[in-house]
Amino acid sequence: MYRLREVIMKLSSDEFKTFGYIWDNMSVGEIILEWDLARLYNVRKPANILRRLRELGLIERGEGCYNLPSNLRRLRKKIGSFSSLRYYIDRLI
């Protein structure tokens, strides 16, 4: 959890929004994700943001979709929404 906190604290605004979107949805189709990020969240160059999050190990790419990696999926099932994750991370020392 501490490593996750460190990584999340260093994310840009667009990376943060993107990670939160995938966290809440766990698995999202590639086309829908890029459309939502660009149109609904005003994320510029979604492909670059997604590549960066993959490099950080925060997401993984499946066949035509993006997912939370299995270690984060287990945490997601315990914690719940992205706002709950932020709550727990904010309280870590």
Image: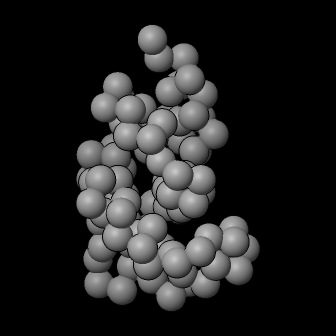
Query: Residue 44 lies in what quarter of the image?
Result: bottom right
Total label count? 0
Rendered view: 20 above or below 33: above
Residue at left 64%, top 78%?
A: 38
Query: Residue 68 lies in what quarter of the image?
Result: bottom left
Residue at left 58%, top 44%?
A: 81
Pick the front one: 32 or 74:
32
Residue 8 x, y percent position in the rendering: 45, 41
Q: Is residue 50 visible?
A: yes
Residue 32 x, y percent position in the rendering: 56, 83
Q: Quadrant of the N terminus?
A: top left
Q: Quadrant of the C terminus?
A: top left
Residue 27 x, y percent position in the rendering: 44, 68
Q: Is residue 5 left or right of residue 82?
A: left
Q: Is residue 47 left or right of residue 86?
A: left
Pick the front one: 36 or 43:
43
Pick the front one: 91 or 26:
91
Q: Is residue 20 visible?
A: no
